[in-house]
Image (cartoon, helix red, strand yellow):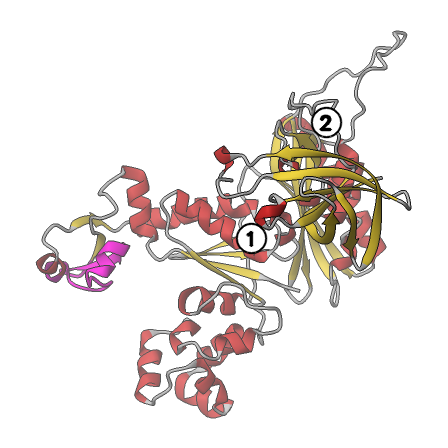
Amino acid sequence: MRRVVSLYLPTWPTDRIRRRFGEPPRDKPLVTVGATGSRRLIAAVDTTADDLGLRVGMPLAQAQALVPDLRVCDATPDDDETSLRQLACWAIRYSPVVAPDPPDGLWIDIAGADHLLGGEEALLADLTTRLSDRGIAARAAVADAPGASWAIARYGKGCVVPSGRTVDAVAPLPVAALRLSSETLNAMHRLGIERVGQLAAMPRAPMVRRFGKEVGLRLDQAMGHAFEPISPLIPQETAIATLTFAEPIARLEDLKQVVRRLSQDLCRKLTQRGEGIRRLDLVVRRVDEKGASLRVGTAKVTRDHVHLARLFDERLPTVDPGFGIEEAALIASHTEPLVEQQTEVPGIAQDDTVDADISRLVDRLGARVGAHRVYRLAPIPTLVPERMARKISPLAPPTGSVWPETLLRPTRLLDPPEPVVATALLPDHPPAFFIWRRLRHKVAKADGPERITPEWWNGDKRAAPRDYYRVETDQGGRFWIFRDAPADQGGRWWLHGLFE
C-alpha cells in the first residue's frame, strides 16, 4: 500500500534567509520582493509579516506603509529551488523515495520505511521537530495519494489519513486544495462551488466541459482514483546499482536473485570507494509506473553482499509486483568509510577471549521485527526498580555501570505494578495472604521490609516511599510485593515482580 507524505514549508524563502544570515530576529517581519514589470510585489512573507496583514502579491509600497520597519530582501527563486533540493537530499534519511515539490514542499513515499521510526505519526513528529529546531516552519500529512497528502498538509486538520479513507478526508476541503489555477478557482466560486465534495458530486462530462480536463485529473489525484508518480531524487555522490528487464518479472524467486545481483554490484562499487553500507534501499518500478521501496539498516558498517541481500528476504513478499516489475535499483543511502583489517594470522593461535561478532544476527533480527525492537539493557545506578535499566544499542560498548551483587531483585518485573488485595497482621508486617488475578495466595515465608524512597532529583517529590517484601507462598511461588504508604496512611499493596 502506497503512503505518501507531503511536507509543506509555508515560509521557506524567508526561513532560508534567516538561517543563512541570522537576521532579522523572529519577532521582526521579513518579506522577499520580486519585480513584475515596473512594479515590485511581495513574493514571500514570514509568519510575523503574515500576522501583520502582509500578503503575497501585495505591492511593496503598500506593505511598507502598513509596516514601516519591514525588512525587505530580493526574491531568489533559483536559490530557493536549489536549497529545496538540498533539503530533499537531507530527507532521504526517512525514505529512499523523496522528491522536491517546488516552490514550498517535498514528497516522501514512506511505504515500507515508517516502521524504522515507530510508525507514521512518530515519523511525521520527528520530521517536523527536526525542521523546527533548525528554524524552518513545516507542516506534514500522510495519505494514500500524493494529491490527498498535499491537500491535507495545506488545508486540512490532522496529519495522518487512515488507509482507505482518502475520499472522506478530502471531500470537506476547499477547492483550492486541488492545485488549480486562480482563474479556475474564481470560476468555481462564482458558481458557488466551495468544497471538493461539491465538485465531486457534479456529473463528470459537464464539469470537464466547463472547467477543463485538468480539473478532473486533479480531483482524481486528490481522491486517490488516479495514480500520480513521484520521481525520486538521487544525489550524485550516492552509490547505486540498477537493473532494467527486457521482460517484466513477478516471481518472488526472481526478485530475490535480482537483489543478490544488485547487492554484489553495489558492494563492488563501494570497495573501490573504500566505503561500507549502514543503510540500504531497494526501489522497484512496475510496468504501470507504480513503485515500491524497502529499507534496511545494519548495526555495523559492512560490504558483505550476501548478508545484505538476505536482509531483504523477510520483506520481499510484501512487494506487490502487479503486472510485472521492469526496473529495480539498490541504493546505498548511508555509507561510512570501511578499510580492510586483518582478522587472523595463519599458524598463530587466536585469542579465545575475542568477542564474537553478532552484528549479522542483529541485522537479521532488525529486518524481521524492526530495528527499534532489537536492543540490550544497561544497568543504571539507582534503587527504584523501574529505572534500573535502559535500552541501548545491542552493539554499544560497555557502559561501566553495574548493579550491586548483594541486591536481591526478581527475574521478572511487572510494568506497571499490578494491584493486589492483601492483609497484614500488624501495620509493619508482611501480608499474611494476598489475592492477585482472582487467585488467593497464602504467605508461608517473608523477608523485609526494604524501604525505597523517592528520588526527588528525578521529579518524585510527591511520590510515597515503598516498603518491599519478598514473600513465598505455601505453593512455592515467590513474589515481590510492596506497600506504597504506611498502613495508617491508607497504603495500598502492589505486586511488582516474580522470582522464577
Q: Looking at the image, can residue 261 be seen?
A: no
Residue at 73% x, 17% y: name it: 341
Amino acid identity at mark 2: Leu
Q: Is residue 492 left or right of residue 92?
A: right
How far across and down, in percent of the image, does residue 64 sit?
Answer: 11, 56
Tell which circle, 1 or 2, labels the residue nearer the N-terminal end. 1
How far across and down, in percent of the image, does residue 135 sit?
Answer: 36, 45
- Relative depth, front residue between 311 and 494: 494
Q: Is residue 131 left or right of residue 71?
A: right
Residue beneath disc 2: 407
Residue at 83% x, 51% y: name it: 441
- Relative depth, front residue between 12 and 53: 53
The label on residue 122 is 1
Seen in the picture, residue 149 relative to 77 is either above or below; the reply is: below
Residue 37 on the magenta segment? yes
Magenta residue span: 35-62
Amino acid identity at mark 1: Ala
The label on residue 86 is none
Could you tell me which secondary element the residue under label 1 belongs to? helix
Q: Which of the two discs, 1 and 2, sits closer to the camera?
A: 2
Q: CA distance from mark 1 to mark 2?
A: 37 Å
- Relative depth, front residue between 340 and 94: 94
Q: Residues within 10 Å of mark 1 (few under 14, many from 20)?
A: few
Residue 76 on the magenta segment? no
Q: Is residue 274 left or right of residue 173?
A: right
Residue at 52% x, 59% y: name it: 5
How far across and down, in percent of the image, does residue 181 sit?
Answer: 35, 74
- Relative depth, front residue between 229 and 446: 446
Location of the C terminus (image quadrant): top right
